[in-house]
Amino acid sequence: MKLGALVAIAACSGALVGAAAAFDFGLGNPVEQVANAITEIDTRRATELLEHTHSDSLALTLERARLAVYLGECDRAEAILSNPALTESHEGGSLAELAKSCARATAAGFVMEDPLRGIWLRLQDDSDRALAPFIFEVAAQARDTVSKEVGIDLPRPLRIDLVRDLFSLSAVSGLPLKAAETTGTLAVARWGRVIMLSPRAPVQGYPWQDTLAHEITHLLVTRATRDFAPLWMQEGLAKRFEVRWRPVRPFDHPEWADTAARNAALDGRSVGIDKLGPSIAMLPTPEAAGVAFAEVTSFMHFFIDKNGEPALRLLLADLRGNGSAGADAALISVTGYGLPAWNARWQRFLRTPLEPSPDAANRASPPVHAQADAGRRARLADLLAGRGHGRASAAEVEPLLATLARLPQIRERVAAGLYAAGDDQGAERALGTEAEIDGLYGPWFALAGRGFARRGRPSDAERAFTLGLSADPLSDVVACEGAPGARPRINGLDGGVTEPPLPTRAPWRDLCKAARSVPRD
């Protein structure tokens, strides 16, 4: 909510607070100071400011409700907003709807905290509890790294909501469900916290660690600029910093943004950094969202490359201090050129041909007919594996290696079937090496780690398990360090099942138990 609307509400509701009650406000406008503290995610200061006034003005009451939402206390916000005088305004009505839907979605949730790292995590499902230690670690690393990059800290605790599905994501964040479904939204940074889908929700998981770092960057940029950063800056910086908290990983492809933005400009699919609307998540198609992400990322890379990191920090500070004048004024203040000039320079850069990537040919999409056959065979292989027919499962997908050998999903299924049949060496040959695949697929890396461990290469095994965790932590193959869940005992007399051993490390052991307890189809 912008300050102008809040001040207008204040003017309509009478005197805000007397001088005697304004103990901690100084000479500033009380509503503005509280609103700024909340927007900057300084909930402690906002709480202190509100504690030192006894005003019952509509404006400050609305800020009390907004603070409750930022603290994750949606039921308290709903109670505050039960006053009809508050919900008559557009801002109050919208916040009341959000508080109500958020309170319903989180009613059965529970909070886990890491006080040492300063992380607050609310979970909807107890089956996601085992993820908490891993989320705490990544969130702290990402927060601390990006804080140094942008030159501003993030008050503790950092709050994260982990939700089970898009319905809950919409309810807790206020993002329209249709927009989330259309663009495949996985997480948002709203109301001073990260609201993120459980990695269990998508069938093959998703890169949850980088997604979490992306959203934490949004919070930091919002705090650094008092929420005056334009969308192209917010999203461009979030994409830039989502990978800076960790070492380089396979398949990072740092040139992806320039390549995609250049291709979109050449074939007429460009969205435009200045035509993004209120949110990339609300663009009409996933393709448009993908192009927009590429364009803002490429633009911010270009801007920082030409001006340096110090100019970025100056730009953030200028927006914080004079953001109401607009991003164009801040750009002129820092660099001497406004957005149209920088946009034109970037467009000229895009028209400069790029050197082709060495593995561009390897990343070409397989023929459509091959993909259709692969889907049918993979499904049948999964059914056979689920019934304990490992060798038959491998045989079903093995022919696909002739045309789709670079797909880790195919190699992993062949290898998993051979492992189940007791053919460890055959499984490792079928799995291949990292250089022979074209994507970060969690189960492939889990089986690669299993092979490294069998051959006495613990450091390589640890790296592979960690990469698998980053992509699909609640796959039973990944969580159990290459050992899938129970399969029927085909040769047993009792018709029972054989349960593979659990990992020895406590966090991984708990994660393995959680993955096996709620199998995914």
Image (cartoon, rainbow, N blue to C red):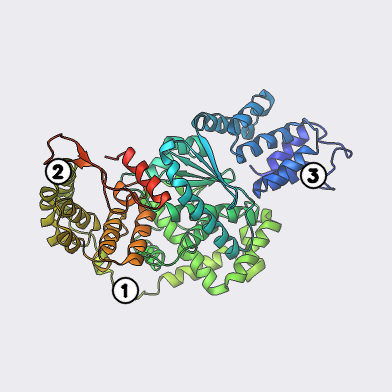
Q: Is mark 2 on a helix, strand or loop?
A: helix
Residue 371 shown left or right of residue 82 in the figure: left
**Which quarter of the figure is the N terminus placed in?**
top right
Give me the residue at 24% from left, 69% from top. 361
Image spot of residue 391 (x, y percent): 11, 50
Q: Name the residue under label 2.
A: 384
Viewer-side residue, 43 vs 113: 113
Q: What amino acid type should be assigned to the residue bearing mark 1? A: Pro
**How would you rate the neighbour count of disc 3 (Cα within 10 Å): few for under 14, some for 14-19, many for 20 or more?**
some
Q: Distance between the residues labelled 2 and 3?
A: 69 Å
Measure how far apart labels 2 and 1 are at the Cα level: 42 Å
Tag 3 residue: 29
Question: Crowdedness of circle 1 by 10 Å Cα count: few (<14), some, many (20+)?
Answer: few
Pick the front one: 45 or 11: 45
Against 356, residue 153 (above or below) is above
Give me the residue at 53% from left, 33% from top: 102
Residue type for callout 2: Leu
**Which is more toward the observer, 507 or 231?**
507
State the image coordinates of residue 213 (x, y, percent, origin top left): 49, 55
Residue farthest to the right, as pictured:
20
Q: What residue type is labelled 3?
A: Asn
Locate the C terminus and report the quarter of the image it occupies.
top left
- Label 1 residue SS: loop
